[in-house]
Image: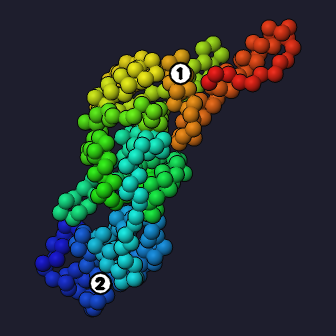
Amino acid sequence: MFENHGVAFSSFDEITEGRPTYLSDYCVSVFVGAVVSKKVKTQSVAYLKENLGALSQREIARRLKVGKTAVNRWATELGFHPVKHTADENFFDSWTSDSAYILGFIFADGNIAWNLKKSYWTLTITASEKDKAHLEKLRELLKSTKPLLYSPKTRSYRLTVTSKNLCRKLMCLGVKPRKSLTAVFPKIPRHYLADFIRGVVDGDGNVRYVERKRSPYFEITIASGSKSFCRGLVNTIRKKFGIPAKIRKAKGNTFIIQYSCSRGEKLAYCLYSRNGLFLERKHAPYIKLKEVRTKKQKEKERMKNGGKNVVYVGVGY
C-alpha cells in the first residue's frame, strides 16, 4: 500500500497510472509520502546546491514541497555533511555591557529549547528582516559560526546557537523555555541595568518622537506577555532612575509599559548616555529629540543676547 498526499494506492503501477517506468526513476519522500520523479529530483538538487547554507534544510524542503528526509538524503549524495557550528559558550559567564544587552534582547525576542534524548540545546534570537545587520552584530559578539537563517513566511531572520553550556547558563540567568507568559525580571548588577533594559526595548519596545507644532513629545513603550516581568521592570526603573510608570492590559495576553514626555526623555537619557549596543532605528528618535532640544536652546540664548547668534556646545541630553 502506497500513499501520496493522503491518497491510497494498492500498487506502484497505480501510482504511475500504468505507464512503463523504472523504480529508480522515482524517489519516495518519507516525510510526506509523495513520489518524486527523477526530473523533479534533478531540478530540486540544483536548487539545493544554490541554497544550502543560505536556507535551512527545513525551509528548502518547504519551498520544494518535498519531505525534509529527502532533502537530507540529497544533500548527503551531493557530499554535503552536517557542519558542527561553534559559539562562545562562556559569553554569559561574566557581566559586561554587551552580555547584559544581549540578555535583555533574549528576554524580549529570544528563546531556548532542548531535547534531552537527542542532546539538543539551542538558543534562538529572532529579528525582522530590516534588523538583519543588528542581528549580525549579535552573532559576531557570540562568535557563532552559523549563518543567519531567513524565513520568507515571517520575513524575519533567526540567529541560532546550539550549545548545552550556553543554554544552561541562560537558564540560570532566568531565561526559560516558553517564557512569553511566565518570564520574571532577573537579577542584574546595578551597573549593567541600563544595558539590559536597552536590550529589552530594542527587542520588544518602541521609541518615537512625535513632532507637532503645539506639543511635540517623546515616548518609549515596552510590551510583554508576562505581567510579572513588567512589574519587575517598572519597579527596577523607578528605584534605579526615579522614573514611575503604570502597566496597562492590551489585547490578548499583552501588557504595555509607557514612558511619555519628560519621563520618556529621562529614561532615554539613562539608556543612551553611555556607550553600548543599540538598534539604530530605535536610537534615531532620541537623536532627533537632541537636535530639537539643541535648536530650541540656541534660539533661547540668541533671544537673550538681543537676537545675536551665540556659540552653543550642547544640552544635557
- Seen at 33% across and 54% down, the residue is 166
Of pointers 2 and 1, the one earlier in the residue sequence: 2
Q: Quadrant of residue 37?
A: bottom left
Pointer 2: residues within 10 angstroms few (<14), some, or many (20+)?
Answer: some
Above or below, comparing residue 55 to residue 36 in the picture: above
> Considering the numbered disc 1 on the image, is that residue within a helix, a strand or a loop?
helix
Q: CA distance from mark 2 to mark 1?
A: 67 Å
Foreground mark, 2 or 1, reads 1
> Considering the numbered disc 2 on the image, is that residue within a helix, a strand or a loop?
strand
- Seen at 43% across and 63% down, the residue is 146
Q: Position of residue 278 (x, y in %)?
A: 53, 40
Q: Which mark is residue 26?
A: 2
| Residue 213 at least partly seen | yes
Q: Quadrant of residue 298?
A: top right
Pointer 1: residues within 10 angstroms few (<14), some, or many (20+)?
Answer: some
Find disc 1 in the rendering and name its residue: 266
Describe residue 245's horizontal placement relative to residue 9 as left or right: right
Describe residue 95's horizontal placement relative to residue 11 as left or right: right
| Residue 155 at least partly seen | no
- Seen at 55% across and 22% down, the residue is 265
